[in-house]
Amino acid sequence: EDGTLAGIAVEFRDFEGMELRGDKIVEVSPEGELTTVWTSWDCFDPAVDRGEALEDGWTFANALDYDPAENAYYLGMRNFGSIAKIDRETGACEWVFGFAGSTIEFAPGAQQFLHQHQFDLRGNRIVVMDNDSAPGTVSRVLEYELDFEANVATEVWSYVSDPSVYTFVLGEPIRLDDGSTFIDWPGAGQLERVSPDGASVWKLNSGAGAPFGFATLAT
């Protein structure tokens, strides 16, 4: 609210004789002052939390949200296949959900996401754009209920467009107040609104080769 901007930036540190590319969250004040409020090394150790491919970018952060009520950042990390809640004041990770470094387990039968991009967290429910974990070249949206006492995530909803689409990069699900979900499938050039029971009620497709980026809904 005070006009501060926050963004994901790259940070290199030496690890086992190589330059390891991690990430950091940098704030820019209205006066232009830059402050690093978090880095990958605040919560993770590359010797333990390896992720998918160190040489391609260790954590590979690709999505950032801020919750003013919690004064917390939510950071998605593609190569970790994980999403973290970060205390803005301390830089501590309150929880991590996903594959690498995760403090929350998937309940039996819950499908895991891979190479996720944007997500939408409301209370203890999180909707995730799952780019790559479905069989074949198919992307989907997965929703989980998070039990922060037991540290367990239960899958409660999933959606695959019909016909199915694949977006290897970007992608964003937005849960609306009426329970429906707006889904941006960028690589496929498709926008879609899905009812709470999983019915596609609205769809827009661009021409071939014309992808979308992230979306901001205006009402």
Image (tube, rainbow, N blue to C red):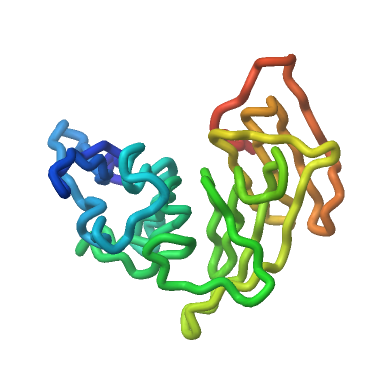
Q: Nearer the viewer, residue 115 or 71?
A: 115
Q: Is residue 36 above or below residue 148?
A: above
The quarter holding residue 34 reads: top left
Q: Residue at x 54, y 35 (%)?
A: 170
Residue 103 image offset from top left, x and y in percent: 41, 72
Q: Residue at x 16, y 31 (%)?
A: 32
Left or right of residue 113: residue 57: left
The quarter holding residue 193 reads: top right
- Looking at this rendering, what residue extends furthest in the bottom direction? 150
Q: Nearer the viewer, residue 132 or 29?
A: 132
Residue 121 image offset from top left, x and y in percent: 53, 59
The quarter holding residue 89 reads: bottom left
Disc count in the image?
0
Left or right of residue 188: residue 170: left
Q: Residue at x 33, y 40 (%)?
A: 57
Residue 73 image offset from top left, x and y in percent: 36, 55
Q: Residue at x 79, y 39 (%)?
A: 164
Q: Nearer the viewer, residue 119 or 140?
A: 140
- Looking at this rendering, what residue extends furthest in the front direction? 17
Residue 160 image offset from top left, x and y in percent: 77, 47
Left or right of residue 198: residue 51: left
Classify the position of the C terminus by image quarter. Answer: top right
Q: Is residue 51 above or below residue 89?
A: above
